[in-house]
Image (cartoon, rainbow, N blue to C red):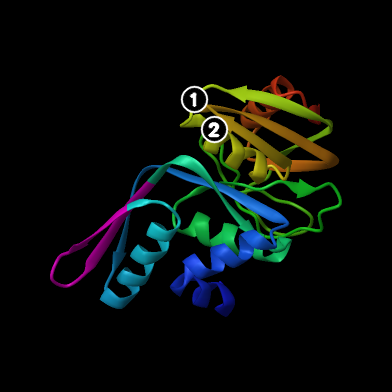
Amino acid sequence: MSHLIIRSLCCIALFMAAASAHASEAIAYRLSDWKEMHYDDPGQAAQHLAAVKKLGCEASQQSHGDHTDVVYRSPAWQALEVANDELAHQWETWLKGAGFETLHGHFENHDGHDHGTTGHVGHDHADHSHAGHDHGPQGAEEVAYRLADWQTTHVESANQLPQFVALMKGLGCEVRTDEHDGHGDVSIRCLEWKHIEVASHQIAAGWEGWLRNKGFEVRHDH
């Protein structure tokens, strides 16, 4: 993890506010089950607790004499918007290291970074290989997608609306929202082909169906 990200974690609220104003990339993230991180240094525990709280997690700290545990979760998908692709991959690495599922769409001419996993509701994930970098076991698959024209989805639940928006941002889509009376319309577009990288054919097929259902053109090479 770069010094930039370590420093940013200490003041993550200011970082997120500044990043969202100039964002060109986003990472969707969630943590469905409680995660416990063990720290011998109480200062590091306090920093991690502050970071996950700023990321919108339910979180608490438990002291056990010789060590401190930070316990947290974030069941709903959220999006962290950042200024560029390099920062997106640094944050994605940190989020995965902290136990989160992540989702980040890559351009088709993407040159390769250490991505790790992509998250999706109801699936387990593993690392993958891409573009000459070691990302995990062989056999990973890609699902490419685009949405050339604006597509509007009506989201009935006020609770589901921010999650849907977070997923669309994580996929790298342009997103417009119109909220009214406890529900909302989300208009999305993805002019250029992008792809997500997943660990297995089963996960890829699930994403392929989900994206087609949302109106995307999809390519999935078996």
| Stretch of the chain drawn in magenta | 59-73
Looking at the image, residue 6 sits to the left or right of residue 174; the answer is: left
Q: Secondary structure at mark 2?
A: helix
On-image quarter of the C terminus: top right
Query: Mark 1 highlights which residue?
Result: 157
Q: Quadrant of residue 52?
A: bottom left
The picture places residue 68, in percent across and down from the top left corner, at: 23, 67
Amino acid residing under circle 2: Leu
Label for residue 32? Answer: none
As drawn, 172 above or below 148: below
Q: Nearer the viewer, residue 165 or 136?
A: 165
Q: Secondary structure at mark 1?
A: loop
Q: Quadrant of residue 119?
A: top right
| Residue at left offset 37%, top offset 47% | 73
The picture places residue 160, in percent across and down from the top left corner, at: 50, 30
Residue 80 visible, this orientation: yes
Q: Nearer the viewer, residue 115 or 178?
A: 178
| Residue at left offset 51%, top offset 77% | 7
Decide whether residue 184 is among the magenta residues: no
Query: Mark 2 highlights which residue?
Result: 161
Looking at the image, residue 190 sits to the left or right of residue 8; the answer is: right
| Residue at left offset 65%, top offset 36% | 177
Which residue is farthest left?
A: 65
Decide whether residue 60 is among the magenta residues: yes
Looking at the image, residue 84 sits to the left or right of residue 166; the answer is: right
Mark 2: few/some/many CA within 10 Å (<14, 14-19, 20+): some
As drawn, 146 above or below 42: above
Is there CB contact under 8 Å for labels 1 and 2? yes
The picture places residue 21, in percent across and down from the top left corner, at: 65, 61
